[in-house]
Image (cartoon, helix red, strand yellow):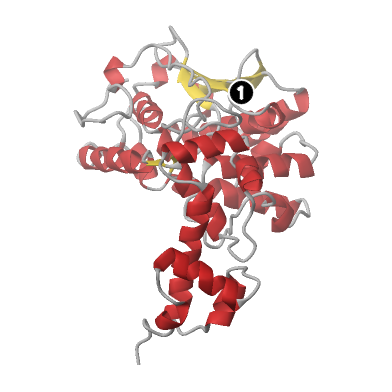
Amino acid sequence: MPTSTSTDRQGLGPRAQDRPAIAPLPGRRTPGTAVGVTLSGDVDGQCRPVGRSPATLRAMIAVGQEHAISQEPLLAGTTLRPELASRLSFDEELHVMRNLVLLCDDAPGLGVEVACRIGFSSLGPLALTLLACGTARQAIGLALDVPPLTLTATHVGEIAGSNGSGYAFDTRALPEDVRAFALERDLALCTRLLLILTQDPAALRLEVPLEDRRITALADAALGVQVTAGCQGTLRIRASSLDVPLPSADPLTLPSLLASTYDLARHQATRVSWADRVEDLLAAKLRDPPAMTEIAHQLHLDVRTLRRRLRDEGTSYRELLDGRREARARELLGAGRNVTAVAAELGFHDAATFSRAFRRWSSHRPGQLVGVDRTD
């Protein structure tokens, strides 16, 4: 898939013209991201992506509300607060996805409902760059090159020998209970986005290995695109339409937009340590911190594996908990909170226990820090 720029992509995948005919499956890696994220157990991949767009979270919450499901059960098992979320991990998105599917009895068309609530602008800067691309071939090549900026949960790859006219949506890396939902959602979402670019429903066709009711739901959402039963989730594009100039093409602006898009993708692909993930979970519940077993469960690991990975990073659950408590204690004490109140806020039984812990952390008495950050 040729592009009009020679931008260096620094590890975001081969240049479009050098990409093999079929994108390799990611093994146990999380689909839709450019870095390894394990879904369960002691498997490869010790880092997590910085995050994904909250657009899918907001869409799932909206669909849940239409099915009389409140936010609380949808977000159960996560530390997400939709009003504050600017990014979320794939694990968190997957958790909410599974909750929605379970609470709605995996209703056919549920994934389509979510896709219909995700607008083109949810892609952020990538949306502008896609609009500026010269052809559908170039736009699709860009999307495949920057998975950290896309919203798909399935792994999307070009079908061998299709010359860019066929794309498979692979669900094998996802838990079985959300595969139909994710396939519905991603096919509907990508089809609707391609229609914005090409404005030609007759140029697209979907093939899906789903039951009739799901096929009907996809057909209703696909705005005139043909949907048929097939052996694999596939989006096909008429070959003659791949290189037709897009109505929104902007060759003058495209090079700078491409450079900015690849820079953003590299930033989003930054890895986050296991220690960071544990700290995030602890910070949300310092008054009643989760035990290591609970944190391991939320991270889809066993305790022994989590302990080893923290040790490999030079830390431990206890050190991370103490560090978060000390940082929060300093913040509260500096703001003028008294020692007893801070002790309660951090889950200590009494002020004396907290004071001993604080002296162990910092070699200072907590009373010495009360009000030191206040400005008169």
Tell me which amino acid carries mark 1. Gln
Disc 1 packing (10 Å; few <14; some 14–19; many ≥20): some
Q: Residue at x 40, y 48 (%)?
A: 124
Q: Would you say 142 lies left or right of 230 here? A: left
192 over 14 or under it: above or below: below
Foreground pick, 269 / 68: 269
Foreground pick, 164 / 298: 298
Q: Let me know if residue 223 appears in the view.
A: no
Foreground pick, 71 / 249: 71
Count of marks placed on residues? 1
183 over 76 or under it: above or below: above
13 over 279 or under it: above or below: above
Foreground pick, 83 / 193: 83
Q: Let me know if residue 49 appears in the view.
A: yes
220 over 230 or under it: above or below: below
Q: In the image as oriented, which residue stretches furthest toward the bottom?
A: 376
The quadrant of the picture occupied by the N terminus is top left
Q: In the image as oriented, which residue stretches furthest toward the top?
A: 161
Q: In the image as oriented, which residue stretches furthest toward the right?
A: 105
Element type where label 1 sits in the image? strand
Q: Residue at x 43, y 6 (%)?
A: 161
The quadrant of the picture occupied by the C terminus is bottom left
Q: Position of residue 64 (x, y in %)?
A: 71, 50
Residue 101 picture quarter: top right
Q: Position of residue 106 (x, y in %)?
A: 76, 36
Q: Would you say 261 lies left or right of 327 here? A: left
Q: Position of residue 115 (x, y in %)?
A: 60, 41
- Residue located beneath label 1 in the image: 226
Q: Residue at x 53, y 49 (%)?
A: 317
